[in-house]
Amino acid sequence: MSEKTGVTAADTGVSRETTETERPIRPPVDIFEDSTGITVQADMPGVSRDRLDIHVDNDTLSIEGRAEIPVPDGMEALHADVRSTRYKRSFTLSSELDGASVEASLNDGVLTLRIPRREEHKPRKIEVRAG
Amino acid sequence: MIRNPGGFENSLFDEFRRMGQELDQLFGSGGWPSGIRSVARGSYPPINIGSTPEQIDIYLFAAGLDTESLDLSMQQNLLTIDGERRPITEEGADYFRKERYDGAFHRVLSLPDDVDPDRVDATYRDGLLHITIQRREASRPRRIEIR
């Protein structure tokens, strides 16, 4: 009956999915860089703005969200590819990135994060003087 | 108004979680018998299906979908979903990761026989496509009076 008996479930040798009832989904991401900074895009379907949490702690950028799925009362599951409503993923930022100036937008479940480079780290062309 | 994320609606989602766990226990690592039209786990987009005596609820977890590209059709109890997801790629940028699905998808779902193809409703919100199909009245459970 009890879903939360993770330890005993592991002992019976059943799949590890039974040991954690709410294992977060690791959202797939695209990450690219241009001269002004790095952009991260993450798929988090079902997450609205007020259920999204982005924070930067030292050099760690964390994305968390909770999907809102409208489920009717008394529903019986027929098929379940998705078994969690939680998303979670984190990244380590390098020192030239300005974690305090991260900008975020959310559109149809796609989170876009813009992490700018610090001003002093913007690329400069280095002139090679003729010897 | 922010509702309690661990509250009521989340406990309803537990039903999907419970089902996955039960199937894993029943069939172990060999997996459960898969439907003839089912696709490999991890295919895009992930789908959940739920049932009540009144309706069938289908959830497609498809963020950033262009709803114009989406084509839903029903023939008897078969629901066909065609769509395309094309993330906007930045020209000239250096990509470190490209994990998000890019391309077309096609799914055929075999639903219970009593669904009514004329009463289908679909909404797309926050990257979640929710399709509701009503079941025919006649097949709903009726209470039988004992005289």
Image (cartoon, rainbow, N blue to C red):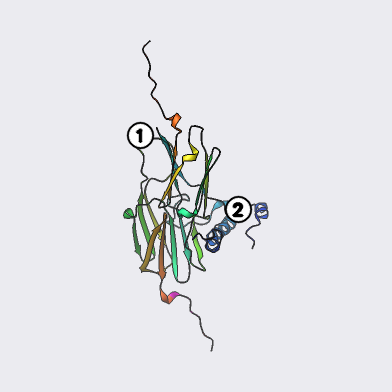
Residue B47 placement: quadrant: bottom left
Name the residue rendered at 35%, 63% in the picture: B74
Magenta-colored segment: predominant secondary structure: loop
Q: Which residue is mark 1?
A: B92
Q: Amino acid at mark 2?
A: Glu
How many residues crowd mark 1 within 10 Å: few (<14), some (14–19), many (20+)? few
Closer to viewer: mark 2 or mark 1? 1
Q: Amino acid at mark 1?
A: Gly
Name the residue rendered at 39%, 21% in the picture: A126
Coordinates of residue A95 in the picture (x, y in percent): 51, 32
For residue A128, which numbered disc appears in the image? none
Q: Chain of mark 1?
A: B
Say which element carries label 2: loop
Residue B140 belongs to magenta span: yes
Residue A121 belongs to magenta span: no
For residue A20, which numbered disc appears in the image? 2
Read off the magenta span: B139-143
